[in-house]
Image (cartoon, rainbow, N blue to C red):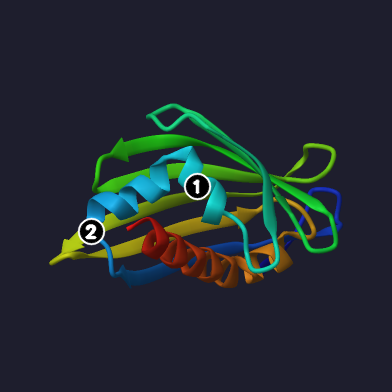
């Protein structure tokens, strides 16, 4: 996290994060990719850290296609995330942008995420590489929670894949 002087002389915070997570799933690559790319599966695990529920999930899974997710916290606060798929290479790779927005629709942070699916026998090695930039005063705290959020989402994915496999 860096603090810089804005043009008005007021200090403004900017924050950046680079995140790499690798996990091996006890499921074939095709099944793990399916869980990432079909709305009926995404709703059950994606973007929802422990205690959160997904209340809305629209997805157009194709290069240039958009998605929009609403995650509700245990306290009942809605958190909106939207983005665009840049690459969809079945069953190897996904690349997408994401922008988290506040209640008024103002951007809080934006990220670029690449997900690689590597065949590992009958298992799948999945790597998430994300770079994120904070755009608002509360963004550093959001960035601080990104690793835990991704880790918890991937735990939910593992549980979901074990049920559908």
Q: Which SS class for mark 1?
A: helix
| Residue shown at the point (85%, 55%) measured from the top left | 9
Residue 123: mark:
none
Q: Secondary structure at mark 2?
A: loop
Disc 1: which residue: 42
- The residue at 59%/66% (across/down) is 149
For the question of whether residue 46 can be seen, the reply is: no
Task: Examine the image and state in which quarter residue 81 appears.
Answer: top right
Q: CA distance from mark 2 to mark 1?
A: 17 Å
53 or 84: nearer the eye? 53
The quadrant of the picture occupied by the C terminus is bottom left
Q: Residue drawn 56% across and 47% down?
A: 43
In the depicted structure, whether residue 105 falls above or below residue 49: above
| Classed neighbour count for the residue bearing mark 1: other residues with Cα under 10 Å, few (<14), some (14–19), many (≥20) | some
Residue 64: quadrant of the picture = top left
In the drawing, does residue 103 fall left or right of residue 163? right
* Mark number, residue 28: 2
Left or right of 162 on screen, residue 90: left
């Amino acid at each position: 996290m860096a603090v810089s002087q804005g043009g008005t002389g007021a200090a403004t915070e900017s924050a950046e994060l680079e995140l790499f997570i690798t996990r091996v799933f006890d499921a074939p690559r095709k099944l793990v990719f399916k869980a990432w790319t079909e709305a009926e599966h995404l709703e059950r695990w994606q973007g929802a850290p422990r205690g959160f529920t997904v209340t809305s999930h629209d997805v157009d899974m194709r290069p240039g296609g958009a998605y929009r997710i609403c995650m509700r916290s245990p306290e009942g606060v809605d958190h909106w995330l939207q983005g665009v798929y840049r690459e969809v290479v079945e069953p190897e790779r996904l690349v997408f942008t994401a922008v988290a927005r506040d209640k008024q629709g103002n951007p809080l942070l934006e990220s670029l995420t690449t997900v690689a699916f590597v065949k590992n026998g009958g298992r799948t090695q999945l790597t998430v590489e994300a770079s994120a930039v904070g755009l608002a005063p509360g963004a550093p705290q959001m960035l601080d929670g990104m690793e835990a959020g991704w880790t918890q989402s991937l735990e939910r994915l593992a549980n979901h894949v074990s049920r559908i496999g």
